[in-house]
Structure formats: structure tokens, C-alpha cells
Image (cartoon, coloured by chain):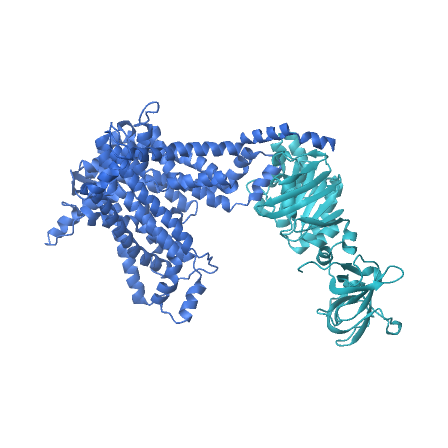
Chain colours: A cyan, B blue
Amino acid sequence: MTTSVTIDSVTKRFGDTTAVDAVSFDIAKGEFFTLLGSSGCGKTTLLRMIAGFMRQTSGHIRFGGKVIDHVPPHQRNTGMVFQNYAIFPHLTVFDNIAYGLRARRRGKAEIEREVKRMLELVRLGHLAHRRPRELSGGQQQRVVLARAMVIQPDVLLMDEPLSNLDTEMRMHLRAEIRSLQRQVGVTTIYVTHDQEEALLMSDRIAVMSRGRVEQLDVPHRIYAEPQTLFVAGFIGENNLLPGTVLGREADGGAIIELAGGGRLRGASTTTGDGRACIVSIRPQDIDIADASNGTELSLSGTVGDIQFLGGAVKLMVDIGADKPLTVALPGRRDMAMPTLGSALRLSVPPHAVRTFQPEVGA
Amino acid sequence: MSTATRSEDPTGRLGAVLGRLFDFWPMVTVAALGLTTLLLLLPVYNIIGLSFSGTEAGRSLFDNYAMFFSEPYYYRSLINSFIVSISATILALLVGIPAAYFVSRYNIWARSLIKTVVVLTFVSPPFIGSYSWVILLGRSGVLTRFFAEYGISLPSIYGAPGIIFVFTLQYFPFVFLLVSSGLKSIDQSVEDAARNLGSGEFATFMKVIAPLLLPSITTAALLVFVAAFTDLGTPLILGEKFRVLPLLIYGEFVNDFGGQPVLASTLSVLLLAVTTAALLLQRWLSARFSHATAAIRPLTMQEPPPLKRMLAAGYVYLLMAIAILPLVNIVISSFLKANGPVLTAELSLENYRRIAGTLARPLWNTILFTSTATLACAVIGTLIAYIIVRRPGRISALLDTIVMFSYAVPGIVLGVGLVVTYHYPPFALTGTALILIMAYFIRRLPFSVRASVSALQQLSRDTEEASVNLGAGPAATFARVTVPLLSMAILSGVLLTWSNTIRELSATLILQSGSTITVSIEIFNEVVNGNFGVASALGSILILLTFLPLILLFTLMGKNEEALV
């Protein structure tokens, strides 16, 4: 039943504003695909167009190669899970789950069997005849999940399904949704603003900003190799520092000078020599350099603040730039704790240094 | 790619577009537009047309209006209407605002009883109040004679002062209810801040509370004004030689019956112009004065010093006693032996015995017409509300405007319009039950729509989308999800509509015939014939029918009195 989805240069305009701007990508059959971005980036609009609640201004959406632009939402056979559950408050748990099957005029025995099977799958069998108001938020969301899956949708659509839950329930349901999805193998499009959720659950992620897809990739590459400044800033903690590309070495590595005068070696850069750039370095990629092993290409600074987080220690190191460099050290038992105000030499492996064009006006 | 190209061919798209025209909601929208056009716009259009026409040739377009504004007999009525309506509005504000403030802010005794009295006054039929005052203060009224024995002559209940008096008492609940609910939306911190900065209680009220209440006050004022300006029953009973505009319309309409009610139409257009202007003004004012405040901690109850508390309580009790007096009087006098217009002090069931034989038909008519119109309002009102809230756009905005316009069309004007439009074959609806039901339906429609609109706005759209997403079409989603979720709002709308429709008089006076007589018409006839005892017995039954749904509304559904306005 489940199918691949193709988004073919889909654009949605509301008056003068463009909510979704010529977005194209393919989602494979059975894939867990996440649209990640902050509010207003167009991810929900795109999802609602896939569900058919909105019509795109231009472009096409295909399910398994077939254009579904003119198919009304109730005939698209998508299963949607909403942020605020959208549970039917006047129906029991059983009737909520049976709703889609009844709309499809399935036989009574089949409905009974399918709903029971789904109730077991989401472990709510004992609550079948309860009313929604008697359920916790997590239970309600599982009902809604079951309700969307029982119809064997071509595509499962989830619009921030976990954002109204408390942290513990969220952790729990993440794992549950992921394992259910793997079990059933349904193509899933998941919308979230929570990057941790996205990285943890997805097969692939499309990071969206201002109606465009900034980067589409598997989670670890999104994290390790951000392709745009936006993704570098949006995913994970990052130091984004202004700098200048001074020149290149024989092996193609670039020499970059940061504001404040520190110099770094970067593995590769597209930025031309002598040009201003933004340098991105993950805090955990920075090490305290051996003082004896100092080369000219290392940073030095003074410790401005120390944040002890248990598993890690964060240092705010003043390197003479506008903002301090954040350094994250693993919190080991015998680690030498730096002291406030002490001078440090820092080293950064060249492949951890990425450069981006500064954004116009940013 | 090849499959894609094939399914994007133009015939497929055309088919889809054509298919959408026959979808559920577009069809409902067209039907709703058609219905409101036939029942509201066409009648209004026709009376406007008639007002510019004449029977003789060679007349100018504005002859009817020219005559109106040149003949004192006619234009006086317009001035009179303004005099009584504006006076009643000012008095209702002066009486109602302090009462609402005292009941909301001071811990005076029996506050829930006071609210009950306000509700009873508010929903009781105005013309019953008027003739009740005639029993009390008329030429041979109970109180008139009582005080005459001590040589005190009471002011007359007839003419302008009497009408203003009755209107004030009948309509101050608008002010009371709206100001009470306005006070609830003011945060205590606002008052605390004013007091902290050195204002006394009165200064705080005038400088801080009253300005924040302005939207409620202006809305109440304009509602009182429109209600007073369009009321027919009260001036019909109390007016004598004092003529107001609705009275003149009724008179001219009855005179012209059989011919074209040209003059009645002309007068109706003038009446409609005033009410429309008033309601537009109200919209503009409430948009202008609205302070979007939500009280986190609403104004608290105060404990004034004993003397202040007693004075405030005394004022409120006196007002409530006067307001409820006509209703109490009706119920009591229905059990008194009557000698024409003069009631004796002898208890008897004679009045009820006398109506027992003739009551069946008007009672059945009343219940049938009211129930049918109420049901139509509930069904069509909810459908229209859905279109307005869930399918915004130009057509839905147009529908909204038409429905809200019906709010501005007074009952008597609608009555004249419906007769003008549907008197002649092929319709020939005059005197039928259908035309009364049509009038009741369209008059209450804006209230039903408004109630469902506000309930729908609080209902998350996701729930309906979930239903659509699961494969239920638009109609099935509406029936299986939207309606069940709105059921409480629809039910309370039904109770309110029933209670408001059952006491309708002005449109009924124009539209009824012998076979479609209602209880309110029967009461009116008995009053005109001076059979006050019988009228009181009928009045008590009508009051009971009006209150029953409200008792359900307040007790079973836990609504408060502010649901009424």
C-alpha cells in the first residue's frame, strides 16, 4: 500500500509572502523523512499541501508517480497525526480508531479485528472503551497514531506530534513511533522544530528555512557537514566566527585568520583567498593544545567562564573576537580543570573547520 | 514522468473543477445565499421599490418621501420615535449602569435573585409589560384608584411619558447584562493601580472603569435604542394620540390592505434606515473603543461600609421591584375575577376557564410555528456559521453581511416586506403558517449564526481535518464531528431562539390571519377589547412558555444570564 512521494517544485504563496518556495525532493517508499525548521519555515504548509488541506500555488505532488494535485483530502489516503492530537472528544478510544475504517465502509468484523490489532500495537487494549478526556496526553497521542495507521495509509504525516508532551513522555514516544514505523514500513513525513528528535528518528532530514530546503541528507551528515551557514547555526551547538581566508597551503588546506588574530588551518574551503567568511567549529572539536607542541597555527586565549555540566565542561575562551569561543571538553574523572582567567592554547583539526559566505545583511 | 504528464491533461483538471461545484459546501453556500435573498433581500428590495413608486402618473420618484417630510402628521411620528427612544436609552443607562456596578462589585444580599429578576424582565414580552402597567396605573388602574382615595393623583401611563417609562424598565436589562459582563473583563490590577495613584472610588469609576466599559455601554445603548425605536406593541397599547413610526406603519398597512402598501413601505424604509444606521454605528463604535483586555484576575467583590452597602442594596431592590411588578401583576390578576377592564379582589379560576375552550388553536399554532422556525434556525444557522468560519472568502463574507443585515431589519418592516413580496400568486402566502415561520426564521437567524460562529471559533480545526484525513467527506465530517462537538452550543441556541420567537408580536401582527392566530395575538386582541382578566391568563401562559427553555438553559446547561445578550 505504502508509496513513494515526489515533491516537484512546489510553491505556495499567501498574498505577497511565499511560504514554500519551489521545493523539490523525492521520498522513498518506507522512508522516515523529516522536515526540520523553526516556526514559519514552511514545513507545516508543505505537510498540509501533501495532506490536501491546502492547494499549492504551483508545482505538483505525486504519490508513487501519480499526480494527486486534484485529489480532495478525504480521498488521498494519508494518515495524519496532529500536534494537538485532534482526537474526537465525543468518541471512545475504539470509535476514534475505527473512524477511518467506517468512513471506508469496511465490514464490522474487519473493523473489530483491525482496531483490536492496532490497540495491541500501541498497548492501549485495556482502554478501548474509555473517553479521550480520561486519557493522559501520551495515551491520547497513541490513540491518534493508531487511528492514522489503522487505515493503512499510503503516507503517514506527522505534524509536531510530540511537542505538547512532557520531556519524559516525548523520549518514550520517539522510540515507540520509530519502532512502529519500522514494523509497519509506512512512508512517513515527520514535521518538527526539534533537531534532536529529527536527528534521532529520521532516515533523512530536509532542513527548511524561509520556504526553501537548505540541506537534505542523512542525520549524521546534516550534523557533521552542514552545507549552509543556516544549517551550521541551526543544527547543534556551534561557534560561528567571522574570519578571513588568507591563503592556501600546498595540500589545498586554507589558512584562515579569525577576528582577534588567531589563525587556523581549514581542510577545504570554497571561499576565495583574501575574502571574508564565517568560520564554523563545533565546541567538542576543539582541544586544549599541548603547550610544548605549539605551532603558529593555533589559537590562544584566556578562560572567561567555566560551565561544569557533569558529562562535559564548557569553557568560554576569550580569543580577542567579539564573542568568546565555546570549547566543550569531555568531563572525565581525572581531567585537569582549567582555572578562570588562565591562558590556554587551543588546537582544531583542519577537517573540523568549515567556512561559509557571510550572509548579506546578517 | 509519462504517467505524470498524462494525469495533468486539461480535461482532467476541468472535470475536477466542475466536480468541485457540486461538492457539499459550495452547494450549501449557494442554497444559503438563495434562501437569505428570498426571505430578506427581496422583501427589503421590494419595499424600497414600492416607496419610490406611486399610483398616479406624473409623480416624481421622491413624492412619497416629500409627502412624509411635509405633512406634520407623518414627520411628527419620526420625531416622536426619536424622543421616546433616546429618552428611554438615556434612562436605561442611568438606571442600569449603577445597578450592574453595585450587583457586580458590592456584596449586597440576594444577588442571584436580582439576576433572576433581570432575566425575567428581559425576556418577558414587552407588550405584556405595557398592558400590565395599564392595569396598575391606567385610568381605572389598581394603583391609580388606591392613591386617588388619599387624594394623590399619579402621573398618566399613557402617551410619551408612559412609553418611555415602560421602555426603560423593559430594556434596562440590556445595559445591566452587558455592563456586568464588561466588568468581568476588567482586571483588578487596573482598579488597584488607579486607587494606588490616588483616585477615590467614584473618580476611579469615571476615569478608569467607565472608559474600559465603553464598548459594553455603547453596544447596550444602541440595542436599547433600536429595540425601543422598533417596538410596536407598547405604543399600540399606551400611545393613544401619541404616534410613533412603527404605529404609523401598522396603521397605514391595515388601511392599505388589499392595495399596495405604498405609504407603509415608505415608512418602513425610513425605520429601516434608522436601525441600519444605528447598528452600523454600533459596529464602528465597538471596533473603535475595544480594548483587547483579558482579565487574568477579574474585579473582585468589595465590602463597602454598612451604610453604603444598604443604600446600594436599597436602590437595586427598588429598581428590581418596579421591574418585576408588571409580571407579578399579570400572574396575580389572571387569578382574579374580572369585570371587563376592572379587576375585582376576588380569587377565581374563571379567566382560565374562559380561555380553555379557545386556547387550543393559538397555543398549537404558537408552538408549531416557533418550533419549526427554531429547528430551521438551528440547522441552517449552523451550516451558515460553518461557511463563515471555516470557508472564509468573498462569498462567505457576503453571506455573513446578509445574515447580519437581517439583525437590522425590524419585525414590522420584515412583515410588510414579506407581504409585498409573497402576497400575490403564484405564492399567495399571506395568511399562511409558512409566511410566519419564514419571518420568525429570518429574524432569529443572525442570533443562531452568531452563537454557532463563536462556538466554532473555539473549536480546533484539526479535529475536523483529522476526520477528512481519515476519509470522511465534507458532509460526513460535518455530521459526524462538527455537529456533535457543537451540540451544546446548538442546543443552547435552540432554547434561546424558542424563548425569543414565542413572544414575537410586530411581524406577527402584520402577517397573521384568523387561522394562524398565535397566543401573543390573542393576548393583544383581548387587551384591545378590554378583557384584562382573560389577557392576563393568556399572558401567564405565554410567560411560562418563554421561561421554560430558559430554566433548562440556566439549570441543566449551566449557562449564565449573559448568554441572553
- Which residue sits at x=27%, y=54%? B91
Screen quadrant of the C terminus of chain A: bottom right
Question: Nearest the camera: B279 or B363?
Answer: B279
Q: Measuring from the top left, give residue B321's x and y in whole percent.
A: 26, 53
Q: Is residue B44 above or below residue A200?
A: above
Would you identify the image quadrant in which residue A118 lies? top right
Relative placement, left or right, of A154 versus B481 is: right
Number of numbered markers: 0
Q: Measuring from the top left, give residue B412's x and y in whole percent.
A: 29, 37
Question: Nearest the camera: B250 or A159?
Answer: B250
Question: Nearest the camera: A242 or B215?
Answer: A242
Q: Measuring from the top left, give residue B212's x and y in whole percent.
A: 40, 59
Q: Is residue A336 above or below residue A64?
A: below
- Most distant residue in the top direction: B426
Residue B285 in view in this figure:
yes
Residue B350 in view in this figure:
no
Q: Measuring from the top left, give residue B441's x and y in whole percent.
A: 38, 35
- Which residue sits at x=15%, y=37%? B340
Screen quadrant of the N terminus of chain A: top right
- Most distant residue in the bottom direction: A341
Would you identify the image quadrant in which residue A349 lies? bottom right
- Most distant residue in the front direction: B58
